[in-house]
Image (cartoon, grey):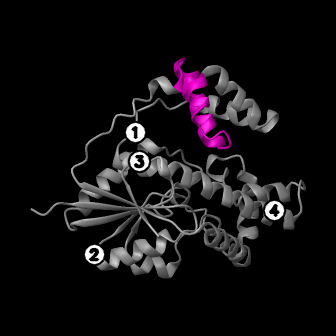
Amino acid sequence: MPQKILKVIEGPTASGKTALAIEWALRYGTEIVSADSRQFYKELNIGVARPSVQELAAAPHHFIACRSIFSYYSVSHYEQEALDLLNRLFEHHDTVILAGGSGLYVNAVCHGIDQLPDPSPQLRQMLKEQEAREGLESLQQKLKELDPVFYGQIDLQNPVRLRRALEVCLTTGKPYSSLRTNSKKTRPFLIERYVLTRPKEELHQRIEQRTDAMIQAGLIEEAKALYPHRELNALQTVGYRELFDYFDGKISLEQAVTDIKTNTRRYAKRQLTWLRKQSDVIWLS
């Protein structure tokens, strides 16, 4: 029986992962599993650079527009569902493609994650309200008090990860870092991880062009329809947050577009920083 292979395509936003995933899917006659957590939600389209209708038709895709922003969905749910799907796909294919920019979700499939408790809805809402009332700095300070170890490791500008760490600390009464074993689980398939990268100037140019194309395609209208639900976790993301500030009258539309480009570049930089820490990846230019 031939060895089953999961080819993983990672890389910063706007690096061209979707195009490469489709190219490889056609080459190997296989299917694509998305690990981009922003593209899971059916209400999000333009702002998350969801593959186009033509791209989705070029090769079978999974985990695209499969969840609602109104339903709770965690990385542990994704890990189990993705592994179940891969078992089914490997019955018909020797190679499957995993593509996406969400490192936590890629790692969940490749190495597994620690099983941590889900918080109560009341606690989750309390932390969201604290962030809205007192700012991100209040969450940062709270995490510094409860778990100084993880405080020194986390991206402090990521509100979703900050709140998740605090949820675990407050639910268990233990530091989040003490519950993370980081032990790798074995998988019944070979994993090849590839990181697609581009020169810095080229990547920044692609981010600028993609943002402009999103605005032209109707991102403002998409964000306006989602604005009443702006407190939801799924909407705490670049491309929507900036336009919500514009709708709130805090900044101009021109400034919102500039902020989207700036924050996307920063997000890409954080992705690359994280990827450089991974020891089992092959870099592709």
Magenta span includes 162: yes
The image quarter containing residue 199 is: bottom right
Give the residue type that dot 1 points to: Ile
Tell me the CA gap for discs 1 and 2.
Answer: 29 Å
Q: Residue at x 56, y 26 (%)?
A: 149
For the view shown, which residue lies furthest in the left direction? 1
Counting residues from the start of the chain, the first of labels 3 and 2 encountered is: 2
Mark identifier at residue 28: 2
Q: Main secondary structure of the magenta part?
A: helix
Give the residue drawn at x 26%, y 63%.
89
Q: Residue 101: x percent and y percent?
A: 51, 58
Q: How many marks?
A: 4
Expressed as whole percent of the image width and height from the top left, the position of residue 280 reads 36, 51
Calculate the distance from the C-alpha at mark 3 to the C-alpha at mark 1: 7 Å
Give how far apart the Cα atoms at labels 4 and 3 are: 32 Å
Q: Earlier in the sequence, mark 4 or mark 3?
A: 3
Q: Position of residue 24 (x, y in %)?
A: 35, 74
User: In front here: 190 or 172?
Assistant: 190
Identify residue for label 4: 256
* Quadrant that contains the N terminus: bottom left
Amino acid type of the residue tagged 3 in the rendering:
Asn
Residue carrying label 1: 113
Instruction: Say what amino acid the circle numbered 2 marks.
Output: Tyr
The 10 Å Cα crowd at callout 4, few under 14, some 14 to 19, many 20 or more, is many
Tell me: residue 172, above or below residue 140. Answer: above
Image marks 3 and 1: residues in contact by CB distance under 8 Å? yes
Q: What is the span of residues highlighted in magenta in the rendered image?
A: 147-176
Query: In the rendered image, which residue does mark 3 sit on?
Result: 107
